[in-house]
Amino acid sequence: MGSLSGVPGLGIRVRVVPEMAPSMLLLRGRMFRSFRVSASSSSPPSSTESIRVRFAPSPTGNLHVGGARTALFNYLFARSKGGKFVLRIEDTDLERSTKESEDALLRDLSWLGLDWDEGPGVGGNYGPYRQSERNALYNQYADKLLQTGHVYRCFCSNEEYSDLAASTASAKFIVSLGRLVIFLTFGGLNRIVIQELEKMKETAKMKQLPPVYNGKWASATEMEMQEELAKGTPYTYRFRVPKTGNLKIDDLIRGEVSTYADGNAAYLFCVLTGILYFRAEEHLPNTLRQALIYKALGLPMPRFAHVSLILAPDRSKLSKRHGATSVGQFKEMGFLPQAMVNYLALLGWGDGTENEFFTLDQLVDKFTIERVNKSGAIFDSAKLRWMNGQHLRSLPSEKLTKLIGERWKSTGIVTESSGSFVEEAVQLLKDGIDLITDADKAISSLLSYPLYSTLASYSNSLSKDDHRRPHILSLLHHEDFPEFSNQFSGVMLAQIDARILEGICHPESKPVLEDKLSEVAASLLIAYDRGEFNSALEEGNAGWQKWVKSFGKSLKRKGKSLFMPLRVLLTGKLHGPDMGAGLLLVFKAGKCGEVAPQSGLVTLDERFKILREVEWESFNKDNPTIEPASAVVAVSN
């Protein structure tokens, strides 16, 4: 799996697998296509064959979701056939490869649950499992191709870049500099040379032809070659591509794929191992050319499967400009590994039913190459988020509570990750949590009391010249408001003023706030002062249910006419989880000691203090009689 490399028409990257391992499958990026130079079957490997699949990522950055999907398909195929999943690190780019990237890559694969049978940290019979450690093996195959006349030494170089050789520690990698291609040298020189291709490319461009190598050293005499070797001129190997002929492979996804040889391609070593390769669709042209290397070395042809690209919603190739694209990013955002695996599997595969939810074990049982489709798959972040929520809520209660509890403790919301408060809060809020990180917002909303900003939103329903508008906005300048402003809305007072004056408020506030809210508030304060409200909460849900029924009767209200005003006055919000359960949790939070001081908790006692100081006349000034919310609802129905 040594490698020399180039650009289309000038240097094609080809690798040779020195180890004569059992049949091996490689999965890399688009659906499967197998190129045939010698006869090869287009059918999947039989169950009697020893299956080996290989995933070979480059440790030059984060693991992209496209690479993760390729690794997943490799894994699923191997496990479904009782084969082995091999991981080999493609650290051929010494300039960009880093130990940090390799470690992150290994962590991401482990996080997804894609454990490998051979590779770094595991070992195996066909190592080493890093490209940079396999130079001696590749040199053997380079010598073999040289001896058989399939390759020749090319001494084309650009002296401007010759000083790069001194900074290179290993001889088996490629680098691209603009339109120049840097190749690896052989013969033990372990130096980089840059081919003298600039002039050739400029000439081809002027003639409106594709760039091709002019074969300068293909017909050089032995004496000319020895002269360059004696001078120590660095060189690269070029493959002698037939001038004519048809290259053909059978792709397990796309069927027969072929191209005609034109003698212009330069080949360098690439990984040639085993029986089947899953690789990206964009590697298809290289695969056809690489097939020549198999034939030249007398190696058995593997099967190929080129997987479709993962596309952005605009059908362009998914990239960083579209948002998060790496496994590590999604992990940090709070996605679950099982949700990521489930969603990635559906990008180009399905079991033929309407079912969209699979565990990793279920995917292993159902995965077949025949169900992998050819068209590009659209990456839908919204659907991934929704799917994550489904997986999250399907977790056993104990595991879900542990995950969210640990999250809340790590963010300073609770003092202990377990306990009755955490358990009850998770059960109450889980339906509104799609990502683990959503849990922070959910609990913060429950503990907060944004009454003033909710009351102020009423100004949205008033005309700009309405006399009540400035009175309502003045609520924002209440002496208690600055203390709670961050808890309520997360923005500063001046920003709230601006947003309200611009009319960015909740339209549902009007019928609720005009439904004699002050009368409900007055009765509620009486119930609190008498101790009736707190006593009811001390009795739990049964006490709350009994109290709210009695309270409604005393006001001759029921349904929305009762519960909407109560929700606003007790929670400070128009919407939220079950009001009774939420109030019971707030009541418990003020007493149990499990909620951290910096959580933003506004206790019930603090809420009634704020409620008591609201100037309700601001709403009633010049206000005509308005029907109760219940009547409005009845008419709308």
Image (spheres, rainbow, N blue to C red):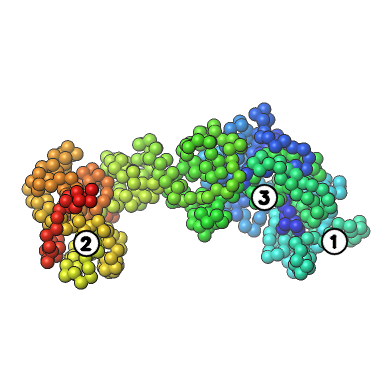
Residue sticking out furthest to the bottom = 465
Under circle 3, the secondary element is helix
Q: Amino acid at mark 3?
A: His
Q: Amino acid at mark 2?
A: Tyr
Under circle 1, the secondary element is loop
The residue located at (67%, 50%) in the rendering is 283
The residue located at (91%, 56%) in the rendering is 222
Front position in the image: 384 or 125? 384
Relative side of 621 to 256, left or right: left
Q: Determine if residue 194 is in view.
A: yes
Mark 3–mark 1 distance (CA, rounded to whole Å) = 28 Å
Which mark sits nearer the N-terminus, 2 or 1? Answer: 1
The residue at which mark 3 appears reads as 283
Q: Position of residue 555 (x, y in %)?
A: 9, 48
Q: Position of residue 175 (x, y in %)?
A: 68, 59
User: In which quarter of the view is residue 114 placed?
Assistant: top right
The residue at which mark 2 appears reads as 458
Instruction: Decide: few, some or many residues near mark 3? Use Cα within 10 Å; few <14, some 14-19, many ≥20.
Output: some
Mark 2–mark 1 distance (CA, rounded to whole Å) = 82 Å
User: In which quarter of the view is residue 543 placed?
Assistant: top left
Please tell me the numbered disc located at residue 216: 1
Front position in the image: 285 or 175? 285
